[in-house]
Structure formats: C-alpha cells, structure tokens
Amino acid sequence: MKIGIEAQRIFRKNKHGMDYVVLQEIRELQQIDHENEYFVFVKPGEDRCVESTAHVHIVELDCPSYPLWEQWALPRAARRYGVELLHCTSNTAPIWCDIPLILTLHDIIFLEPRDKQNHSLYQNMGWLYRRLVVPRILDKCRRIITVSNFEMENIIRKLQIPRERMAMIYNGYNEWFRPVDDTEGIYRKYIPEPGYFFFLGNTDPKKNTERTLMAYSKYLNQSAVKRKLLMADLDHEYLNGIIERNGIENIRESIVMPGYIINSDLPYIYCNAFAFLYTSLRESFGIPLLEGMACGVPVITSNTSSMPEIGGPDAILIHPENSDEMAQMMLRLETDEAFYQQKRAVGLERAKLFSWRKTATQLLELYKSIQ
C-alpha cells in the first residue's frame, strides 16, 4: 500500500508538540515497516531531521501559507504519487480530497470557549482555521486517532463520533530522555546553577503561566532555599504584565528566561532541575510530563484532563487553579526528602509504559486494518 503522511512543519527549526509526534512516528515506521511505501509531505525548512530511505520518500512541497499548503498542495501531490491512504497528523486535513483519510485529532480545544485575553495572532488564526476545517472533514475520515482516553471520550461526547471510528494511540518520548550525568555542564547554557524549578510555559492561557508564577511567588515567600525558576520560550513583556497585574515583584530577580531550549538539551535541563512544573489547565496528552518522569525529576502536574491518566495514580497532582496548593507542593518537595525520592522513583517507573516504538506499532496496525 502507498501511504501518505502529512508532516508539514517537521523541517522548521523551532518545533512544537505535534511536529515531534509525527517526526518520531516516521522514524519508527522507517525501521519497522518494509512492506508498505510511504510518501511524507513536508514544507521546506532548515532542519532536515529525517531523510528518505528505500521505502520512505520525503516530498517537499513549497507553498506560501499553511491553509494553501494543506488544502491545495497536499491533496494534489498525494494524487500525483498515487497515495492510497492519507494520514493527516495535525488536527486538520484537506476538505476536498478523494483519497481515504486518517486524521490525528490531538484535541478539540478549538471548540471550547476562547480566552479573551489571548492576543497571539498565530494562536488565534490557528484556532479559527481549525473551527472552519474540522467539522467539514470528520465524516470523510475512515478513522480518527487521538492520544488519550480522556480526549477520546471528549471527542465522542462533543462531536458525536461513533466509537468504532475512533482509535486511541498514546504518544511516546525520545530515548535520550533518561537520567544523565551532565559532565559538560550543558544546562549552564541556560542557567548558572542546578537545583532550579523548571517550567515550560508560554502565552497560551491553557499553559496556566500566570497562576504558576503566583504560586512561585508564594513559594519564595516561605522557602528558606528560594530556588530559581527556569522558564523557556517566554518574553519579558508578557512576564512584566503578569508581575504588575498580581503585585508579585518578588519573583523578578529569581526567574531565568533564556528563550527557546533546543530539544537535544532538554534532558540536561530536566536532570539538573530540582522539580518540573507541568501545571497546565488542559492537555490532551502531555509529552513533557513523560520526559520529566523519564529523566528522574519529580513532576508537579495537574489533576485535570489527561494528566492523571498519563502521570498515573501516584503522580503529584494539584488543582491547577489553586496557586496555594501548588506552592505548598513545591515546599513539600523541598522539605520532605522521603516524599521527594518516592515521587522520583514513581515517575521513572511510570515512564517505562510509553515509547515511540509502541506508538508506531499501533499506528501500523491501524493502517493495515483499513486496507
């Protein structure tokens, strides 16, 4: 069978969650499937992170915008290469396409109420595009994949998708996320000393950045150690707004914001952290939660959406809208050594349940079931 995989953004330098998912799926499929022929459709970019092999062909399609690339260039190229099954991996797909479709619908956040404080043009345009496209393609998809039982039940309930058309396939994490000795001091590219709290926040309201910083302020007021907070991918203007709105000036000198952290450096960032804060309001899966656990760092995460499912029954779960509870858990990790070591061990064991090889194997079984 000739299988097409949409992977438009995997060649861009600053990748995000969905980009890494499809990239790892492609790499694993290259290793485990030598029967089917794959055509991976990408947009040209500077990070050529995967190359063609005998049975996996990387096809670059140059087009000026995401919608034009997906709605015009992608189906046209898929027909040209004789694709018999097209897997669209990033929530949307071509509306006019006569090739059988599989869709990975990571989440349906675009159907939920939009936070009016979100002024990101990129995020708002993406939200609008998904609202326009997804309802028009669902009936055309042979199967709809999502990444957690939480999200599958959410999709079935809100979109009235028959259960037999749904498939749940967990994400994995890269094998280099494990306890490592940072002999070269790679973490120092981003922060001078180890033993910090680490937070992957941004301006998306679901990441809960504001409440997490309020919790950090309360932690600083009560801690004898006063650990630094390393925050990736956040700008100073956004931080200043949070500080001024909440009167938490005490956090300013304790926050380190180095900008984007490349993925290959992240294991060293996790392993040199005291704890990882993954305090989102909502996640359909949460790969960073797995990465932190796999590196042996205690993870404070939320008791909402998919995070209890992925983190497991013994994870450190807090209510993400309660900054007091968050701060108290940060302090407990600092003052209760037995609790700290227990949660570290729990995370290491839990992470063993997930891998990209498992993800790709289940994906291949799904492809075969549609022949």
Image (cartoon, rainbow, N blue to C red):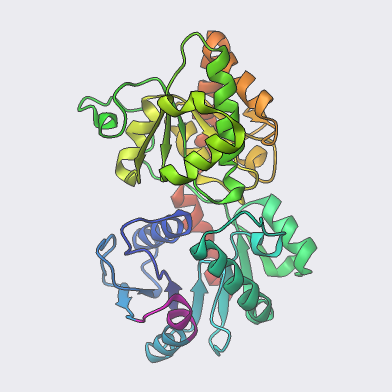
Q: Position of residue 174 (x, y in %)?
A: 39, 45
Name the residue located 41 percent from the left edge and 25 percent from the top edge: 253
Residue farthest to the left, as pictured: 184
Magenta segment, which residues? 63-71
Nearest the eye: 300 or 28: 300
Is residue 66 in the magenta section? Answer: yes
Residue 25, visible in the rendered structure: yes
Is residue 322 in the magenta section? Answer: no
Quadrant position of the N terminus in the picture = bottom left
When asked about the image quadrant of residue 5, the answer is: bottom left
SS assignment for the magenta stretch, majority: helix
Q: Position of residue 171 (x, y in %)?
A: 52, 51
Nearest the eye: 371 or 199: 199
Residue 1, visible in the rendered structure: no
Name the residue located 59 percent from the left edge and 66 percent from the top edge: 127
Name the residue located 45 percent from the left edge and 50 percent from the top edge: 356
In the figure, is residue 19 to the left or right of 311?
Answer: left
When asked about the image quadrant of residue 261, the answer is: top left
Nearest the eye: 144 or 359: 144
Q: Is residue 67 above or below residue 12?
A: below
Q: Is residue 291 above or below residue 221?
A: below
Q: Is residue 220 above or below residue 367?
A: above
Quadrant position of the C terminus in the picture = bottom right
In the figure, is residue 84 to the left or right of 214?
Answer: left
When asked about the image quadrant of residue 61, the answer is: bottom left
Q: Is residue 90 above or below residue 173?
A: below
Q: Position of residue 211 (x, y in %)?
A: 62, 35
